[in-house]
Amino acid sequence: MMPDKSAITRAVQTAYSDHAKDTGGANASYIPYLASVDPSLFGVCVVTADGDVFEAGDTGFEFALESISKVFSMTLAMQDVGLREFHDKVGADPTGEPFNSVMAVAMHDNKPVSPLVNAGAMSTVSLIPAESPDDRWEKILDMQSAFAGRKIKLSDAVNDSEQSTNFHNRAIAWLLYSGGTMYSDPMEACEVYTRQCSTLVTTRDLAAMGATVAARGRNPVTGKQVFDASLVPPILAEMTMEGMYTSSGDWAYKVGLPSKSGVGGGILAVMPGTLAIAAFSPPLDPVGNSVRGQKAVAQVAAALNLNIY
Ligand code: DON
């Protein structure tokens, strides 16, 4: 059931003001650009499945999408190759290991198990049918834009920072190639994957992106059907299993909303059929999830009695 508008306004405002002064956590330091973002920035936004927007704080600030991009490329791959093939090739299980774990790949014969960590995300990119690397990149960018309801752009500054430091991901891409689960050139998949992480979104964009999942594949702000409604359950299942990295189980237990975070400080949570909650704050916990972002999302979800279980 849709909470009433005054309750949503209050929940968003309170989650913002209760945590506006919080400190704790640290910006991601392994990507130079991310280390330089102002850690005091903080935004909270809800977009409903009817397209209403509620926001507080720095919701117009553009930050790096990072790992949240995995949800949109996964959707594209599910749509283009079909759910069965996608599941067979990329999987839907938590790895139980950090998002960039080499061990998680090595333990599974150099095959991915989840599209929402780096290995599976690169394999996912390689699966998207395309004429050329640029064509594959354009499809991914168009998908991000359709989800957000506005043209999403690459940040050259983020991308340069990431492409020049992504050696660990390149190693994972070669392991996958040796396991037979790279469906394009592995360095090309790694390069396109790195680009998809380097686009800029606002907290408002992120909430609209989530609301598109909440509204069964239809962007409630633009009215455009972005993907087929039949993909919603597997998208939400994947987000539940691995969307918050190694805290995904704890998050499901405590908050109960399928979610996805990124090391840029963004978090997106979806209450199917109802609304999406997005938050942004750069300092992360050791697992890689925004400290304040988690508090804000959890507080809005609790205040509105949203929990899929
Ligand atoms: O692969 C990386 O290291 C980043 N471009 C994205 C990382 C992120 O948000 C957490 N990872 N899955």
Image: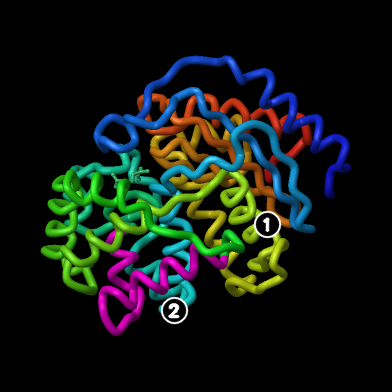
Rendered residue at 18%/44% (across/down): 165
Q: Could you say whether the residue bearing mark 2 is in a helix, strand or loop?
A: helix
- Amino acid carrying label 1: it is Ala
Q: Earlier in the sequence, mark 1 or mark 2?
A: 2
Image side of residue 210 versus residue 95, left or right: right
Rendered residue at 34%/65% (across/down): 124
Residue 80's disc number? 2
Image quarter hosting the C terminus: top right
> Which residue was labeled with disc 1?
214
Q: Position of residue 197 (x, y in %)?
A: 36, 52
The magenta segment: 122-146
Q: Can you say whether 167 is above or below 223 in the image?
A: above
Image side of residue 238 versus residue 48, left or right: left
The foreground one among 296 and 195 is 195
Which secondary structure is most common in the magenta stretch?
A: helix
The foreground one among 94 and 142 is 142
Residue density around tag 1, few if under 14, some if 14–19, many if 20 or more, within 10 Å: many
